Image (spheres, rainbow, N blue to C red):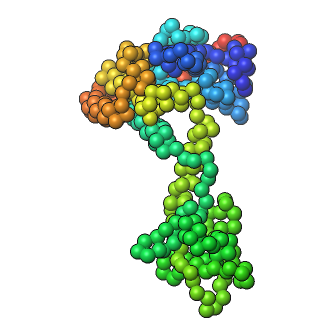
Amino acid sequence: MTIQDLKDQGLIIYECISGSRAYGLETATSDTDIRGVFILPKDAFYGLEYIPQVSDESNDIVYYELGRFFELLKKNNPNILELLNTPADKVLIKHPVMDKIDPTIFISKKCKDTFGGYAFTQVKKARGLNKKIVNPVDKERKSILDFCYVLHGQGAIPLKKWLDSKGYKQEQCGLVNVAHFKDVYGIYYDEKNEFGFKGIQRKESATSVLLSSVPKGGESVGHLHFNEDGFVKYCKDYREYWDWVDKRNEHRYQDNLEHGKNYDSKNMMHTFRLLDMAIEILKTGKINVHRPNRDALLAIRKGEWEYDDLIEQANEKMKTLEQAFATSKLPNKPDYGAIESLLVASRKEIYKESQY
C-alpha cells in the first residue's frame, strides 16, 4: 500500500504538518514534514497482512495505522504524542472520531524515559558529529601494515619505516608465532625468494597477518607486533565515518561547519526542546508542541553556544527532569484497559461508515 493508495481510497483520518513547522522552529530551509493516521479497509484489517505504517522513501511523510498509532501512544512515544497534540492550525485532515481521543489518558511518567531518553540520544548524536568533525578519517583506507610495529632498541618503530630502513619488501618476509607472546611474530627474510615465504599480507584488504613455514636453523631478522585491536577499531571508525559522509544531509552539515562549533546544532536544539517538554509534561500533564522559547532554541540551532556550555546546561536540565519526575502526580503508566476500549470504540465507529 502506498501513500497514493491511502489518498485515493480516502483512508487518511488524520493528517498534520509536523516537525519544526509544528514546533514553531522552522527556518527558511526547513522541509515540510507530514504525519498522520490511516484506517485499513475492513477486509485488509481482518486479513493476514496487517500494514502498520506507510511512508515515502525519505520518511518526510509518514502515516500510522490506527492500531499502531494507539500502540505508540500507549508507550508515550514522543513523536506520536506530539502528533496527537498538534496545534489546530497545523491540522490538515481530521475525522470526527479523532476529536474523541483524549490525549490525557495516554500521558504518564513514562514520558521521563521516552522524551528524556530521546533527548539523551540527540546529545549522543551531537557528540558523534563533534567527534567526526574534529577527527575526520582519510578516504584512503589503511592496511594491517599500518598497525604493525617492529621491536627496535628500547621501543618499537612502524613496520613500514623498518622495511624502508632495511631495504626489505613485505612480500619477501615470513612470519612465525612466538610462543607465549600474543600478536608477536618472528620475522624472517628471503632475499632470493628461495623459501616461498607468504609475506606479511597478501592484499590490501587483509584483516590478519600471514604465517609462513621457515627453514630449520633460519635466523629471524626482527620481531613484529600486530596491533589487531587497534586495526579492528580503525576499521569500525572508517566504516562509520564514510557511511555517515555518504548519508549526511550536506546542507545541514555545511550549516554546522559555518557556525564553527563542531557539533550538530539541530540535534542540540531538539535536545533542549525535548527536555523542556518532558519537564512540562511531568509538571502539568499537558503537551505543548508549539514552543514558547523559539528565539532561545533557534540561538542553539544557529550555533551561538559553545558545545561544552550546552552539555553542561543539558545536564542541569536532566537534574530538573529527575526532580519533576519525583514530584509528578501523573500515573506511572497509562490505563491500558481504557486505551484498548477507546481503540475498539474508535475502530467500530469508523467501520460503520460504508466507505470503509
Is 10 located above or below residue 202 in the figure? Answer: above
**Residue at x-position 71% and y-position 31%:** 47
**Residue at x-position 63% and y-position 79%:** 189
Is 228 located above or below residue 4 in the figure? Answer: below
Question: Considering depth in this image, is 111 or 319 the residue closer to the camera?
Answer: 319
Q: In the rendered image, which quarter contains the C terminus? A: top right
Q: In the rendered image, which quarter contains the N terminus? A: top right
**Does residue 286 appear in this view?**
no
Question: Considering depth in this image, is 236 or 108 the residue closer to the camera?
Answer: 236
**Residue at x-position 66% and y-position 83%:** 213
> Which percent across, then down, holds residue 212?
66, 79
In-image side of 257 versus 187 (left or right): left
> Which percent across, then down, holds residue 298?
42, 19
Q: In the image as oriented, which residue stretches furthest toward the top?
A: 89
In-image side of 312 versus 214 (left or right): left
Q: Quadrant of residue 113?
A: top left
- Report the number of numbered marks: 0
Question: Considering depth in this image, is 254 or 35 the residue closer to the camera?
Answer: 254
> Which percent across, then down, holds residue 303?
41, 26
Q: In the image as oriented, which residue stretches furthest toward the bottom?
A: 217
**Residue at x-position 55% and y-position 18%:** 29
Q: Quadrant of residue 186?
A: bottom right
> Which percent across, then down, holds residue 178?
53, 81
Is 274 located above or below residue 135 in the figure? Answer: above
**Does residue 160 appear in this view?**
yes
